Amino acid sequence: MSTRNLAILTGIIVVVVIGIIIVLVRPGPVTEPKIEFIEEKMGYDEVGWLTSIDGKLVYEAREGDKWLVVYEGEEGKRYDEITRLTSIDGKLAYVVREGDRWFVVYEGGEGKRYDEVTRLTSIDGKLVYVVREEDKWFVVYEEEEGKRYDEVKYFTNINGKLAYDAREGGKWFVVLDGREGKRYSSIGDIININGKLAYVVREEDKWFVVYEGEEGKMYSWIGDIINVNGKLAYVTGERGKQFVVYEGEEGKKYDRVEWLISVNGKLAYKAREGTRWLVVYEGKEGKMYDHIYHPINVNGKLAYDAREEGKWFVVYEGEEGKMYSWIGDIINVNGKLAYVTGERDKLFVVYEGEEGKRYDDTWLPTNINGKLAYIAKTRGKQFVVYEGEEGRRYDEVTRLTSIDDKLAYVVREGDTWFVVYEGGEGKRYDEVTRLTSIDGKLVYVVREEDKWHIVREK
């Protein structure tokens, strides 16, 4: 081969190799968003909480030292402070402060002024909140003021009737539909068990549950009460042992019991005997391990992390998975298990029992439309892996979000931030935050220089 031909061949090889390298390392095409966006260029000093009222965007904003609510693009009156944007049967309500007085704004009208207003919520589609006037607390329900008490705490809905606990002097009691119950030394959270009122009380040095107005057996202590398929369950103890009371029946005694949950309408919890842990599900004891992390419900099936001799693995439907040095939180992706783990300084996701590709770092596995998405990092760059496909690389990736079953997330390149949505990159801003879905459409807050505004899907 002549020198000239050799030089030509060498040049061709170099060009091909460079082309291959470019294909392998290029970050992927930059595409414009497939969906149009509208910038609400109002330019506030701060944008607070975003939410949806009857499918319409509403948020708090600040101009100077005054706050206002923007609802359907219309600005409301300015106040010194605004909090607790709430939907009451599809109508907007919130708490505001003017000077040292607080009141509720509901359907655009201002309510009576009080020293303090808190716990704004809806009971059976009706407005309810707690107020303080001088040294007394009371409930305002359907614009009617209730009886004054020294203190008012939790409230809930019992078959469309308001229930809350109140204190007079040193005694606590429950008020249900305006009627006061028996007085006790202390009352814990009140909950709804299949339309029936339940709460924990203390009288002197004994604790018991009041359920449907009946006092249960006394114990030295009682933990949180939960609803398992319409049945009452809680943890308690006697003489150094702990056990579960479920449907009024005492379970087996252990050295420790914790983390009660409902799995497919059946009670599950973890317990310790000596130094060994096990899970009790449907009244049956599982295998013992050195340690067990919190059991969870995955599509109606029981799953948990367990550790044995320094190695961690997942137990799912009673079957033990592969052992690793550590395991992250388990998540449910369309009824399938996913979690992050690692080996030899590399991290990866295990999904449906299969190990994914190794990366320098991996985090935030998320369910997007029944498909697995997570963030990975390689050689200092971050990207999203969705349905097993790697996305474009960026300096930083955050806020994986499902918008009407479509993947959206926030990224940074250099000192600018933007949203990637449906595979397309949005406009660059100084900062992007509060990525959320309003009526199935993407909405987020951005900063340009010193001003904040809303960007929303058209």
Image (cartoon, rainbow, N blue to C red):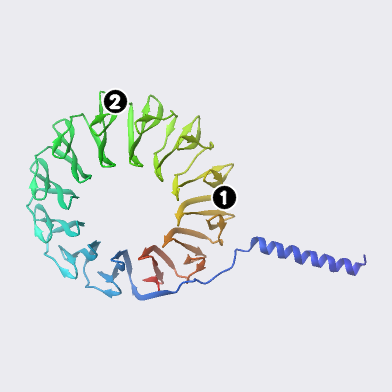
Residue at image location 54% in from the left, 57% down from the top: 382
Q: Residues within 10 Å of mark 2 (few under 14, many from 20)?
A: some
Q: What is the number of the mark on residue 263?
A: none
Q: Which residue is mark 2?
A: 241
Q: Is residue 418 above or below residue 251?
A: below
Quadrant of res 455? bottom left
Front-most of residues 266 and 206: 266
Image x and y of residue 164, in percent = 15, 48
Front-most of residues 156 and 364: 156
Q: Is residue 259 above or below residue 15?
A: above
Q: Residues within 10 Å of mark 1 (few under 14, many from 20)?
A: some
Residue at image location 33% in from the left, 68% down from the top: 46
6 sits left or right of 141 in the view: right
Q: What is the number of the mark on residue 360?
A: 1
Q: Secondary structure at mark 2?
A: strand
Quadrant of res 13? bottom right
Image x and y of residue 73, in percent = 30, 74
